[in-house]
Amino acid sequence: DAGITQSPRYKITETGRQVTLMCHQTWSHSYMFWYRQDLGHGLRLIYYSAAADITDKGEVPDGYVVSRSKTENFPLTLESATRSQTSVYFCATGGGLQETQYFGPGTRLLVL
Amino acid sequence: KNQVEQSPQSLIILEGKNCTLQCNYTVSPFSNLRWYKQDTGRGPVSLTIMTFSENTKSNGRYTATLDADTKQSSLHITASQLSDSASYICVVTDHQGNLIFGKGTKLSVKP
């Protein structure tokens, strides 16, 4: 039982293509988060979800779409990928905003 | 603007030595402060979490301290091991639940 998994782990795509990154948890945590991590920046929050069908924007939401139809899944979609979205994407889960977050292994995305 | 600044940016030490990483923040009021360890190519893992009323918290060879008056925290690593080579990230949570991440300190432990 891996707890939190992300797929794919690596992805290469082209500018303008749609890409979906998957995140799955087995802990039944209420909250799920998507971050991106770039050199020279700390982790930056893209979107988060407090429960199924409830999502909120983070610091850098532009160009991304999320959904949460089931508690255990929180996919992140880049509707039309741009080179600036080349990054490492981390999904995380937690019991609440004030509680410890548990991070997945990350997805390395390269947009050509 | 709420900020979290970490120093040094990178650090190289010899195996068995101690080291201290610094975190200064401007987040006010804040709810808690956390230290995460991130191994290369992996997601961050929580080491410690402290509320504003706590001064110190230990997790094995890792000891975090917090001075809420000066808005400073430190992470002390005792008797370093090669496996301590990683990035260490300081994260401050404000009262609204927003997490403000530092850019991290990259620690290299050499044999």
Image (tube, rainbow, N blue to C red):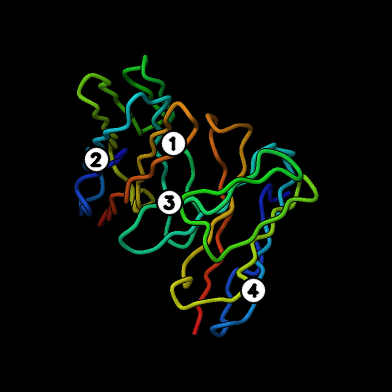
In the image, B82 versus A64, the foreground residue is: A64
Tag 1 or tag 2, which sits nearer the N-term? 2
Q: What is the C-alpha distance between the residues marked 2 and 1?
A: 13 Å
Q: Are marks 2 and 1 on the same chain?
A: yes
- From the image, which quarter does the C terminus of chain B lie in? bottom left
Residue A17 point in image, percent of width and height: 62, 81
Label 3 sits on what residue type?
Gln
Q: Residue at x 44, y 36 (%)?
A: B47
Q: The numbered mark 4 sits on a residue in which chain?
A: A
Q: Which mark is residue A19?
A: 4
**Dot 3 crowding, Cα within 10 Å, few <14, some 14–19, many 20+:** many
The answer to whether the residues at label 4 and label 2 have Cβ atoms under 8 Å apart is no
The answer to whether the residues at label 4 and label 3 have Cβ atoms under 8 Å apart is no
Q: Residue at x 35, y 46 (%)?
A: B88
Label 2 sits on what residue type?
Leu
Residue A93 point in image, percent of width and height: 62, 43
Tag 1 or tag 3, which sits nearer the N-term? 3
Q: Are marks 4 and 1 on the same chain?
A: no
Q: What is the C-alpha distance between the residues marked 4 and 2?
A: 38 Å
- From the image, which quarter does the N terminus of chain B lie in? top left
* Residue identifier under label 2: B21
* Residue identifier under label 1: B47
Q: What is the C-alpha distance between the residues marked 3 and 1?
A: 10 Å
Q: The numbered mark 2 sits on a residue in which chain?
A: B
**Dot 2 crowding, Cα within 10 Å, few <14, some 14–19, many 20+:** many
Secondary structure type for disc 4: strand
Secondary structure type for disc 3: strand
Q: Which mark is residue B69?
A: none
Q: In the rendered image of this protein, does residue B43 appear above or below residue B36?
A: below
**Does A33 sit left or right of B21 as displayed?**
right
The answer to whether the residues at label 2 and label 1 have Cβ atoms under 8 Å apart is no
